[in-house]
Amino acid sequence: MPDMSASLAMTHMVPLAAEINNDKVTPGVLGFIVFAALALGVWMLMKSMNRHMGKVDFEEAPDPSAATPAATPGKGAPKNA
């Protein structure tokens, strides 16, 4: 019985295939491959960027307006090493 449903499906698809316009331009398989390659490249770049950003270690400079005069270096306060 599975052969009957496949045959029936094919007979319904044949008229649809005959109605394809040969003058219509579509991206096709090559367009899909190029798009997939670009998407894969962007994904790999984002993964690499996240890995590199995770390695970045920095200390934020203290806010100069919040510092008290006694805590500024050069005024007798010990420097943090």
Image (cartoon, rainbow, N blue to C red):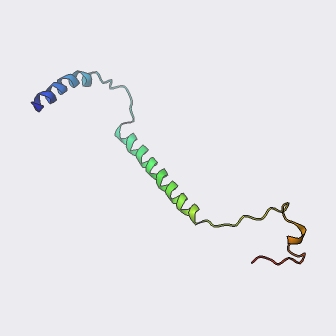
Q: Is residue 21 above or below residue 61?
A: above
Residue 4, percent from left and from top: 11, 27
- The quarter of the rendered structure image containing the N terminus is top left
Residue 60, percent from left and from top: 72, 64
Q: Residue 42 versus residue 23: which sits nearer the camera?
A: 42
- The quarter of the rendered structure image containing the C terminus is bottom right
Left or right of residue 36, residue 72 in this image: right
Residue 32, percent from left and from top: 38, 41
Residue 28, percent from left and from top: 36, 36
Residue positioned 58% across, 61% down in the render: 53
Q: Residue 27 versus residue 41: which sits nearer the camera?
A: 41
Left or right of residue 55, residue 81 in this image: right
Left or right of residue 42, residue 71 in this image: right
Residue positioned 80% across, 61% down in the render: 63
Q: Quadrant of residue 11?
A: top left
Q: Residue 74 versus residue 50: which sits nearer the camera?
A: 74
Q: Is residue 12 above or below residue 39?
A: above
Q: Residue 6 versus residue 1: which sits nearer the camera?
A: 1
Residue positioned 12% across, 32% down in the render: 2
**Tally of marks:** 0
Residue positioned 23% across, 21% down in the render: 15
